[in-house]
């Protein structure tokens, strides 16, 4: 669930892109990169690590130009090696750099096609490098002569939509021309546009979340529509075109549950308001399943569950207390690579305030339970602190199915709710009782905020894959690949694990 940003300005963009990446850091903690362009030259710096660690003053100085793109990465395909940090670059046609949020489901097939038919060599196992090469090839095909116009770019994106499967929100920079941005025809991953009027003319930002626009002092213009492409030329002129034949909007429900920042608005729905609604619907269910007196106090598991837990407590007329304090220097554990570091980080990240638990029946609320890493540790911490009874509630339904659209959970067995009933999950996390949100209530939580949103990509909850091309065979294959990693990518993952352990030690 990477964060991407593209800026076209009348002034240098390096600091703007850096600031936007800091605001999108919660979407990807593994690697970060920026590519700018000036006088037909690209300047790029990317590496493994958090944004604040990747860019030194000397790197920032070298990133010249009034146009550029950036990305913070949470790997879902290929490996976590620095070679697969983004943006990616190809030198022809024109010179293109690209940053991608999402996950392609036919990238292996495309990689073979690219080599056999299009004579393009792809040097990593990143789906995003494949995506860039498809784009480059189609721009080459759509262009006649030496110059490029928006119509040719839109034609290239239209053909790309036909070749590429999966989810993709993209920003790409074309040397000497401008910034191209587009979103897959199902609108799975978010992408929005912001603008700022200056005395030199309008400048634009395209970013994964509206929080990045606001943080830069830009105003929200609109979301990029599913299948739509936007082109902003170097002079700041904006062009747009619908490039898909049957676009439909199916935003990822997990963005609203966990990934996005609560202060973002995605596809017209405030993430914060949706999380409050999740708390409200979950409270209704708890009211049905418990009697007054069963619960003394409601506590959130920081950070992401806070709005839901707060609203739930309000609806149940119960005390809301902060029983766990988060270490602000530890990142999001779910996004960390490998189970060992995730488990270690939960204890480093959260610490209980003993007095809040002693002799009480506590209702712990989290936004979701995925692998159960957090909930297992937290229930134990509550008990160690003297809780009389520990009830756990999840503002999202059980996560039972692999995700193939940009959340790194390709194997069923890693999901604690796979093949288990609610009672069995409850036993696994050693809670006294467990309540999950219902899937319909989750969807309603988002639709209530924006009634125009009726369809969602919610495959990890309901097993429905909106792109329609995900077979049982495909799921078995990605599961096998994850359980039997190639020796090279094994090394890359190990070195990344060490790097992340060094960060948290
Ligand atoms: O069942 P699990 O596999 O543990 O995954 C779910 C947990 O991971 C996330 O927290 P995270 O620490 O990533 O980030 P947060 O601070 O935004 O809550 C999420 O909010 C849950 O707490
Ligand atoms: N989470 C994402 O958006 C990942 C982008 C891309 N699939 C990668 O692995 O780099
Ligand atoms: Mg959490």
Image (tube, helix red, strand yellow):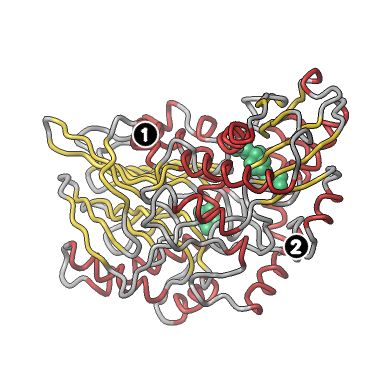
User: Looking at the rendered structure, which numbered label has been put on residue 62?
Assistant: 1
**Which one is earlier in the sequence, the residue at label 1 or at label 2?**
1
Residue 173 lies, in percent from the top left, at 31, 52
Q: Are marks 1 and 2 in contact (CB under 8 Å)?
A: no
Which is in the foreground here, disc 1 or disc 2? 2
Residue 61 lies, in percent from the top left, at 36, 29
Give the distance between the C-alpha atoms of the residues marked 1 and 2, in whole angstroms: 48 Å
Compared with 295, 246 (above or below) is: below
Query: In the figure, is residue 417 to the left or right of 63?
Result: right
Camera-side residue: 454 or 179?
Answer: 454
Compared with 61, 377 (above or below) is: below
Classify mark 2: helix, strand or loop.
Answer: loop
Residue 365: which quarter of the image? Answer: top right
Residue 424: which quarter of the image? Answer: bottom right
Query: In the figure, is residue 207 to the left or right of 426?
Result: left
Q: Which residue is mark 2?
A: 418
Residue 72 lies, in percent from the top left, at 49, 43
Residue 263 lies, in percent from the top left, at 44, 35
User: Looking at the rendered structure, which numbered label has been put on residue 229?
Assistant: none
Give the crowd class for mark 1: few <14, some 14-19, many >=20 residues within 10 Å.
few
At x 34%, y 54%, the residue is 172
At x 39%, y 54%, the residue is 451
The quarter of the rendered structure image containing the C terminus is: top right
Classify mark 1: helix, strand or loop.
Answer: helix
């Amino acid at each position: 669930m990477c964060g991407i940003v593209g800026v076209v300005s009348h002034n240098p963009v390096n600091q703007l892109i850096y600031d936007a990446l800091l605001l999108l850091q919660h979407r990807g903690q593994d690697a970060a990169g920026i590519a700018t362009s000036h006088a037909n030259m690209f300047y790029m710096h990317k590496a493994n690590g958090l944004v604040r660690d990747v860019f030194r003053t000397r790197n920032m100085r070298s990133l010249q130009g009034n146009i550029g793109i950036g990305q913070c990465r949470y790997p879902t395909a290929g490996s976590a090696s620095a070679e697969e940090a983004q943006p990616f670059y190809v030198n022809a046609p024109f010179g293109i750099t690209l940053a991608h949020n999402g996950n392609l489901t036919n990238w292996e097939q495309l990689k073979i096609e690219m080599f056999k038919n299009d004579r393009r060599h792809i040097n990593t196992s990143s789906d995003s490098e494949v995506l860039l090469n498809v784009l480059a090839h189609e721009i080459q095909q759509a262009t006649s002569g030496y110059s490029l116009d928006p119509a040719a770019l839109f034609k290239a994106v239209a053909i790309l939509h036909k070749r590429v499967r999966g989810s993709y929100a993209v920003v790409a920079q074309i040397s000497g021309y401008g910034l191209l941005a587009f979103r897959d025809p199902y609108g799975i991953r978010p992408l929005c546009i912001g603008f700022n009027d200056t005395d030199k003319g309008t400048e634009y930002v395209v970013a994964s979340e509206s929080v990045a626009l606001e943080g830069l002092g830009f105003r929200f213009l609109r979301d990029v529509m599913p299948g739509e492409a936007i082109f902003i030329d170097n002079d700041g002129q904006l062009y747009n075109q619908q490039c898909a034949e049957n676009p439909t909007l199916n935003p990822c429900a997990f963005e609203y549950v966990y990934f996005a920042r609560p202060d973002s608005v995605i596809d017209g729905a405030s993430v914060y308001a949706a999380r409050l609604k999740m708390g409200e619907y979950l409270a209704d269910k708890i009211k049905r399943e418990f009697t007054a007196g069963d619960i003394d106090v409601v506590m959130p598991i920081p950070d992401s569950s806070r709005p839901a837990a707060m609203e739930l407590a309000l609806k149940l007329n119960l005390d809301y207390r902060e029983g766990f304090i988060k270490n602000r220097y530890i990142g999001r554990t779910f996004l960390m690579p490998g189970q060992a570091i995730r488990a270690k980080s939960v204890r480093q990240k959260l610490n209980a305030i003993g007095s809040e638990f002693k002799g009480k029946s506590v209702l712990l609320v989290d936004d979701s339970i995925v692998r159960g890493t957090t909930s297992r540790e937290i229930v134990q911490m509550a008990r160690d602190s003297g809780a009389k009874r520990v009830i756990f509630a999840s503002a999202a339904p059980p996560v039972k199915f692999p995700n193939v659209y940009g959340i790194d959970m390709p194997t069923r067995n890693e999901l604690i709710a796979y093949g288990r009933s609610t009672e069995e999950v409850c036993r696994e996390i050693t809670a006294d009782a467990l309540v999950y949100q219902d899937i319909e209530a989750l969807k309603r939580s988002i639709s209530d905020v924006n009634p125009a949103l009726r369809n969602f990509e919610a495959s990890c909850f309901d097993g429905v894959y909106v792109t329609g091309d995900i077979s049982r065979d495909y799921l078995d294959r990605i599961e096998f690949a994850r359980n039997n990693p190639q020796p090279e990518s094994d090394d890359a993952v190990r070195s990344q694990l060490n790097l992340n352990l060094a960060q948290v030690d």
